[in-house]
Image: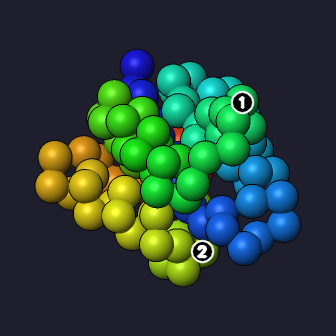
Amino acid sequence: MKRIYISGPMTGLPGFNFAAFNLTAQQLRALGYEVVNPAEKQSEAEELSWEEYLKQDLQQMLTCDTIALLPGWQASKGAHLELHVAHRVGMNVVDVAQLHREELAEAI
């Protein structure tokens, strides 16, 4: 089973965009993926700085073989860094919307 890390914008968005992260995690789990959702981790954590959250997120991301990018990731400093690291360590990179289309095509 593939282990997927969800990456996308949080800072400055209502509710830190947790709703989009959580919905995506639910959808990917329904497709059979093991999902690492930083929104779940952050909602459990104490108050940390942005840098401390990112350090934790990167550690979790490195346990995965795929990074899935949410819409709007391009506007996120953290997602850019996560994507850079993912490329450097040879992780698969997918767009969440593309992943859903591919799964749908396989199911038909």
Residue 99, how many percent across, how many down?
50, 51
Question: Eyeballing the image, is 14 above or below 33?
Answer: below
State the residue position of label 2: 72
Query: Which quadrant is home to the C terminus?
Result: top right
Residue depth check, mark 1 versus mark 2: number of the one nearer the observer = 1
Label placed on residue 82: none
State the CA–CA distance, disc 1 to disc 2. Answer: 24 Å
Question: Eyeballing the image, is 53 above or below 1?
Answer: below
Question: Eyeballing the image, is 50 above or below 14?
Answer: above
| Residue closest to the far bottom | 75
Question: Eyeballing the image, is 72 above or below 4?
Answer: below
State the residue position of label 1: 44
Query: Which quadrant is home to the N terminus?
Result: top left
- Residue type of the residue flagged with mark 2: Gly
Closer to the chain start, of discs 1 and 2, is 1
Left or right for 14, reference 23: right
Q: Residues within 10 Å of mark 1 (few under 14, many from 20)?
A: few
| Residue closest to the far right | 14
Between 46 and 37, the one lying in front of the other is 46
Left or right for 38, reference 90: right
* Residue 24 visible in the shown view: no
Residue 36, how many percent across, how many down?
53, 32
Classify mark 1: helix, strand or loop: helix
Q: Residues within 10 Å of mark 2 (few under 14, many from 20)?
A: few
| Residue closest to the far top | 1
Q: Quadrant of residue 26?
A: top right
Residue 28, how many percent across, how many down?
61, 36
- Residue type of the residue flagged with mark 1: Glu
Q: What residue sits 75% from the left and 59% below the top?
A: 16
Classify mark 2: helix, strand or loop: loop
Q: What residue sits 53% from the left and 47% below the top?
A: 53
